[in-house]
Image (cartoon, rainbow, N blue to C red):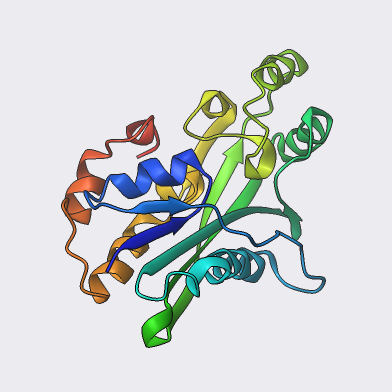
């Protein structure tokens, strides 16, 4: 039984690799269309499930893992900016405030009709950064393709005051929950999840411990 990560995200691939397991990567075919009236946490969970379901039937014998991250501020959902202008608008909305990061996780095994989906939430406080700092960050184009228009593990960390909650959840994959779900399906991890969280061997994880 193989593990397939239904994602195009390099950061999710890197985080999953920390568990010391082999897996394949296949791009999901689902579209991220926000459903009216659905809460941001439930939307993140649904996006994750949609990603996994979009390829599950093609690989019925494999474990399919899907994940998706959305940002919530004052009850409003922020996804990924379409361009730099939208990224600027998002970051100005987040500036000087805290917001919630919701990362949905889904694991499907089509052959056994196993399907589970959950969501993990963490809190992020953004500094009251200056216009010059904003301009400098936008010039990196790191905002593109990132929920909320920033990357915690990249240059965007300079905009972060502090976090409360699980670092991998904010980066894009609630690793502790992933390990639990995989082990429940009989997957043996090459690295214990306790050791991974003790060492924090990823980007600037230790800086936000």
Q: Residue at x 63, y 71 (%)?
A: 42
Give the image quarter of residue 63: bottom left
Q: Residue at x 47, y 39 (%)?
A: 10
* Count of marks overlaid on the render: 0
Point out the image quarter for the C terminus.
Answer: top left
Give the image quarter of residue 59: bottom left
| Left or right: 185, with 14 as reference point | left
Determine if residue 74 is in view. no
Where does the image place residue 97, in percent across and percent down from the top left? 68, 41
Question: Which residue reaches farthest front?
Answer: 58
Say above or below: 112 vs 82: below
Q: Nearer the viewer, residue 179 or 97?
A: 179
Question: Which residue reaches farthest bottom?
Answer: 113
Where does the image place residue 138, in percent across and percent down from the top left? 71, 22
Q: Nearer the viewer, residue 35 or 205?
A: 35
| Left or right: 38, with 191 as reference point | right
Say above or below: 173 vs 1: above
| Left or right: 101, with 25 as reference point | right
Where does the image place residue 101, in percent across and percent down from the top left? 58, 53
| Left or right: 89, with 147 as reference point | right
Say above or below: 34 vs 23: below
Q: Residue at x 39, y 59 (%)?
A: 4
Q: Residue at x 73, y 19 (%)?
A: 130
Give the image quarter of residue 198: top left
Say above or below: 148 vs 203: below
Point out the image quarter for the N terminus.
Answer: bottom left
Determine if residue 190 is in view. yes
Where does the image place residue 175, in percent across and percent down from the top left? 36, 55
């Amino acid at each position: 039984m193989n593990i397939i990560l239904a994602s195009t995200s390099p950061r999710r691939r890197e985080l999953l690799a920390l568990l010391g397991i082999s897996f394949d990567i296949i791009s999901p075919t689902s579209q991220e269309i926000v459903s009216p009236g659905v809460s941001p946490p439930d939307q993140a969970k649904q996006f994750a499930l949609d990603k996994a379901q979009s390829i599950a039937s093609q690989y019925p014998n494999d474990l399919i893992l899907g994940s998706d991250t959305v940002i919530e501020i004052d009850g409003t959902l922020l996804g990924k900016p379409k361009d730099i202008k939208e990224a600027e608008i998002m970051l100005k909305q987040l500036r000087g405030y805290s917001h919630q990061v919701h990362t949905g996780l889904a694991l499907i095994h089509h052959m056994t009709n196993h399907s589970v989906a959950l969501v993990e939430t963490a809190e992020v406080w953004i500094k009251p950064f200056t216009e010059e700092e904003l301009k400098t960050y936008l010039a990196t184009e790191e905002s593109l393709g990132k929920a909320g228009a920033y990357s915690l593990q990249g240059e965007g960390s300079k905009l972060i005051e502090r976090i409360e909650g699980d670092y991998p959840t904010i980066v894009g994959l609630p690793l502790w929950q992933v390990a639990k779900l995989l082990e429940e399906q009989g997957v043996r991890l090459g690295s214990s999840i306790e050791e991974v969280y003790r060492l924090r061997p990823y980007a600037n994880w230790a800086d936000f411990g």
